[in-house]
Amino acid sequence: MKRLIINADDFGYSLQRNRGIVECFKNKSITSTSLLVNSVAMDDAVHHIRHLGIPAGVHLNLTEGLPVGRHFESLVDENGFFLGKLGFRDAIQQGSIQYQDLRTEITAQLNAYYEAVGRKPTHVDGHQHVHVLPVVRDVFAKVLEQQGIRWTRLPAELDLDSCTWSSQGMRAFFNSVVENAASSQEVFTKHSIRFPDGFVGLSTMGKEMTSDRVVQALTNIMNHNPATSTIEWMVHPGYPTEIEGGCGSGADDFSRSPDRFHEVEVLNNTHLKQHFKENRFKLVAFSNLNQK
């Protein structure tokens, strides 16, 4: 039997996002979530984690909104906000990101999770996949090892060039994520950080998600390596963010669009759930992976 983690990213981003994630958890359409600890609706998300027992990790954010810590000049712009998905990557290429700033902010976000939730996160992954970027991955792995956190995400999705429904620009970004993930595998292993054998989710975000595409992506993994035992499917369910959302700088267009609710509908699709059952996928969380 293969184990499938269905992890909902961005918990806390907005009340509407939280609503969709909670709905999917109650419907057993997701198995875990990743919390944005600098998000505007974090307190509401933490309430649900604590009262519903949602297995949760940290969605490490170094690109959007305000940092949890302060005075990190290499991580923020003149207004104190993170540099953005592309701006942060440009700063890494320019060599302007400071190791100590990364260590301090990563630690601050983990501490914020501990204080809010009252327990260790089941895993830590990266908002916009920052945890597999050069420079970041080394600091990230060392901090997780020191904190005794053993699980992360390795976003190395297969066959992305065949995903013709995605734009050329998005496929280029996805392929860069996969290349960085491949380079991170040795770093994570060196620091005893583990990750699922397979990954799905880059090519099936928002309006691009269909049950057929998800099934095909899972099939690609098993065809590539029949011995695969654990797969993570990254998802982003929610309702459109109508008013306040984000991490201090407002909600983006993706969050305001109907794409997030489209994911809710696909996740709750009975055909997809039947496929999991017929193909012997056991739905689990990161917290279950050390159990036999």
Image: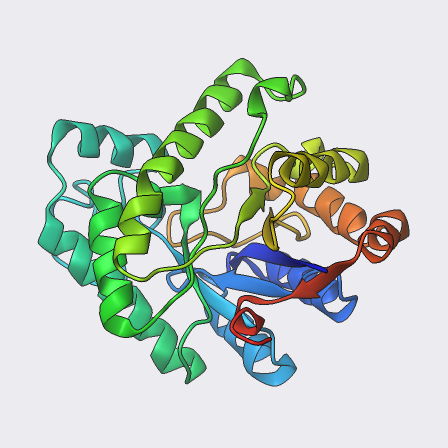
112 vs 239, nearest the viewer = 112
Q: How many marks?
A: 0
Q: Is residue 92 left or right of residue 198?
A: left
| Residue 263, picture quadrant | top right
Query: Residue at 66% of width from left, 45% of height from top?
Result: 260
Residue reaching furthest to the front: 227
Percent x, y of residue 190: 26, 55
- Residue 63 seen: no
**Position above or below: 204 against 276:** above
Query: Residue at 43% of width from left, 60% of height from top?
Result: 36
Percent x, y of residue 284: 65, 66
- Quarter in which the C terminus is drawn: bottom right
Query: Residue at 67% of width from left, 34% of height from top?
Result: 220
- Residue 140 seen: yes
Percent x, y of residue 191: 26, 59
Q: Is residue 72 left or right of residue 248?
A: left
198 vs 61, nearest the viewer = 198
**Position above or below: 244 against 176:** below
Percent x, y of residue 291: 56, 76
85 vs 130, nearest the viewer = 130
Query: Residue at 48% of width from left, 73% of height from top?
Result: 43
**Position above or below: 168 against 231:** above
- Quarter in which the N terminus is drawn: bottom right
